[in-house]
Each structure stands twice: as C-alpha cells, then as structure tokens.
Amino acid sequence: MNKLKFLFSFLLIFFYSGASFSEVAPSDVVADEYGAVTASLTGVAGDPANGRKVFMNRKQGNCLACHVNSEMSKQTFHGAVGPVLDGVADRWTAAELRGMLVNSKKVFEGTIMPAFYKDSGYNRTLKKFVGKTILKAQQVEDVLAYLQTLKE
Amino acid sequence: MIFAKKIFITLFMIFGLNLSNASADESAELVVEGQPILTRTKAPSHMENIDEVRSGWTFRIKETQALQMDDFENPGMIFVDKGIDLWNKVEGSKNKSCASCHGDASEFKGLRTVMPKWNASAGALWSMEDHVNNCRTEQMGAEPLKWGKAPMDSIVALIGLQSRGMTMSVKIDGEVQPMWELGKELFYTRVGQLDMSCANCHEDNYGVMIRADHLSQGQINGFPTYRLKNAKLNSIHARFKGCMKNIRATPYKVGGDEFRALELYVASRGNGLSAETPSVRN
C-alpha cells in the first residue's frame, strides 16, 4: 500500500515537472541576432488546423486583422496592414517564422506587428494581460505549422 | 419624427453593416445643409510625416457619409436636441439655466475651433467640458456633469455645432506648449500588450483596412461623434479610451492631464479642417 502511494506521488511529480519543463518560458526563448528561434517552444509538433483557427480568432492571434492569404480570402473581414502571406513558407525558414511570432520586433525593426510570445517590457498593459503572452507556447507552434502550409 | 429616424437607423445598421468592408468614397465632398465643409487640406506645418490632413468622414463608406450630409438623417442631431433642452433647463441653487446667461447657444459660434485652450483664471488647459462644468458649479450652483455621459456630450455637441464649417485652429504655443509636447509624446508612445502607438495606426497606416475597420487619421474635428456602433454620441476622451483598451493598454483618466494633452495635440493635427460636429462614424 505504502509502496503504491509512493509510486503514485512519484508519477505525479514526474508528469507535473515534465509538463512545465518542456515548455520554454517567454524570457528563456533563445533568438539569434536576426530574431530567428530554432528550438520548438514546447517540443510538441504544431497542429496546422488549430493554427489556422488561432490565426483567425479575434481574441487569439487575430492575424487576419492585418494579414490575409488567398486560402482565406473568403473571410469577409481581413486587413491589409501587413503583407499577404501566400508563399511565406518559401520565403522564410521555420526558425525565422517562429522568431517573427515570438517577437517580430527583433526581425522587423519598429514594426507594428505585436510580439506574440513576450510577457514583459510593456508600457501600461491592462491589468488582466499583465505578465501574460498574447499566445500560449503551443498556439505559437500551431500557427507556425499553419504558416508552413503556405507555399506557392 | 424621432421614431422615423430610429427606424431608419435600425435599417441602416442591418444593411449598412454588411457593407462596412466596402471601400469608402474617398473623393466625395461634404456639404451639410448647403454649407461646404473642408474635409481635406494641407497639413499644419508642425506635422512632419503627413502632407494632407483628412477628416474621418473621407474614410467612411458612402452610406455612413450620407448620414452626415443631411441634418434630418444625422442621428447625432437627436442628441443636439437634447442638448437644447438641457441648455434651457433651470438647475441648481441659483435657479439659472445656460440660457439665463448666454441666451442662445449661437453665442458660442467659433468656440469649438479653438478648444482645448488655456484658461488664464484657472491656470489650466480647458476642454469644452470644463466650460460647461464651470458655469454649472460657479454660475448655476448645480452639480457638474460627468464627462463622457449623454447630458454632457449633448451639450458639448450643441456648442460644437455652432462652429460647424469654421476652420479648426487650436493654439499650440505659449502657456499650452508643455501640454502640447506631452500630447505629442503620448501620440508616439507605444502602449499595451499589443505595443502600439496612436501613430502606428493613425499616421503610418491610415487608409488601410485593419480587419473590418478602415483606418483614418484619428482626427477629432467632428467630435462629439455619433457612432453607429453604440448608437450614441462619443466624446473625444471616450474615443481615446476605447482605442487604448483595444490595444490592451490601461487608458489614462477621462478628463485627466494626459488625455487633455493628447486632445490638444490631436486637435492641432486637424488645424485647417472644418469643424463638423456632430459627425457620424461607424
């Protein structure tokens, strides 16, 4: 009985730490001098279908506010602040795209595009968003997987 | 009459919203009740990155533009009517109304074009709301009105309407210069989790769609403005607050120093345009 309890708590600790250690915290993300991020943020392969949803969702990526790509052009409301993303996977490597999602300011100096995986260094953030990133680590990986489907 | 207007507005919202992604009629000319309104002009000399300033009206779709071209169709005029009622209403310990001292609101023809402006006796930069509240508390012995609420916005719209068609010309030097500088700094400072400044949208990207919205220069020459979105008048500071919340930033206080400064700076970016109060936007 005691042994079983021991094994059970051991397993719990194992899973708990496993989950938190495999996800890279925003402040620990390593980017190269051009802002590219090579390592996955979660170690779990991205899901392009979910990434597509995150891309469109106003409360998540809301990428559609500024970008569109032909595949989505039937979406009634899309913006034109940023470039059309057709063929983006041919133009950029996965590491570069991940870097843009994490913190586009390191890739495009002075860009209007928000940093989606950065949780500090902001000015007057609304209370409910303080210390938070716009997207979760796995959502970044999912959007990345979606972007990688955008080939000419 | 008002009922008919309401039906019209409802119909417009049902059909109009479907059209809101349609392109604006950017070359249209605004004439209200026979009076031409200047909606584009050379930018004031203090502006470094924009050559031509344009009223928000030029960015709206035809249907929205049309609502502002006829006072009967302009839903903002319903609130101006409420403003007239309030203008004549006796209130406070001194049993006076605005009309008791000022007669007709037309006494304030031209005032809107120079607001906000330095008030020497108060030693502060005053918005239109300050004039209204100063009269209420000092001359009428009445409670001040809350900024950004219907009674205040209605009376501010009534006063603003008296200057419609006149040229915006707020003063930016002298006593107000430090406030103007602060406002300019705020306009270019990135804030919030989306980390954007007013300039990112209203200077770098006006004329561009951001999701369903056609970005304008964020001019305030038509305020208070009637918005189809919330079917009421919207004050200048309320609009600033809304834009800040959209970028997930903690807004400055409505009626506080930062928004007063920003109001002065943004107003000065519209110097040369006509006052269009009450404008109609989506």
Image (cartoon, rainbow, N blue to C red):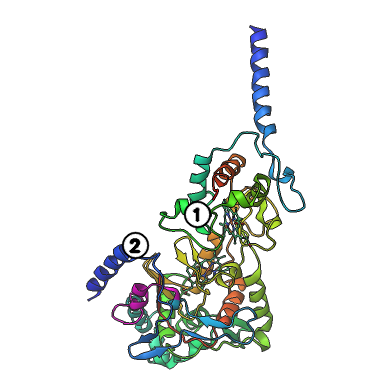
Foreground: B247 or B210? B210
For marks 1 and 2, give the CA distance: 22 Å
Q: Does residue A146 appear in this view? A: yes
Segment tinted magenta in the rendering: B59-77
**Crowding at label 2, few (<14), some or many (≥20) Cα neighbours within 10 Å?**
few
- In the image, residue B85 above or below residue B258: below
Q: Is B143 left or right of A122, judged from the image as shown?
A: left
| Pointers 1 and 2 in contact (C-beta within 8 Å) | no
Q: Residue at the spot x=30%, y=62% of the render? A: B14
Mark 2 lies on a secondary structure that is helix
- Check disc 1 and report the residue beneath it: A69
Foreground: B143 or A9? A9
Total numbered circles? 2
- Which quadrant is home to the C terminus of chain B? bottom left
Task: State which chain disc 1 sits on.
Answer: A
Name the amino acid type tagged 1: Asn
- Do tags 1 and 2 sit on the same chain? no
- In the image, residue A54 above or below residue B244: above
- Which quadrant is home to the N terminus of chain B? bottom left
Q: Residue B266 carries which label?
A: none
Mark 1 lies on a secondary structure that is loop
Q: Residue at the spot x=53%, y=72% of the render? A: B206
Q: Residue at the spot x=51%, y=64% of the render? A: B242
- Check disc 2 and report the residue beneath it: B18
Q: Is B233 left or right of A96, judged from the image as shown?
A: left
**Crowding at label 1, few (<14), some or many (≥20) Cα neighbours within 10 Å?**
some
Q: Does residue A118 appear in this view? A: no
- On the image, the x and y values in percent for residue A37 come to 70, 45
Front tag of 1 and 2: 1
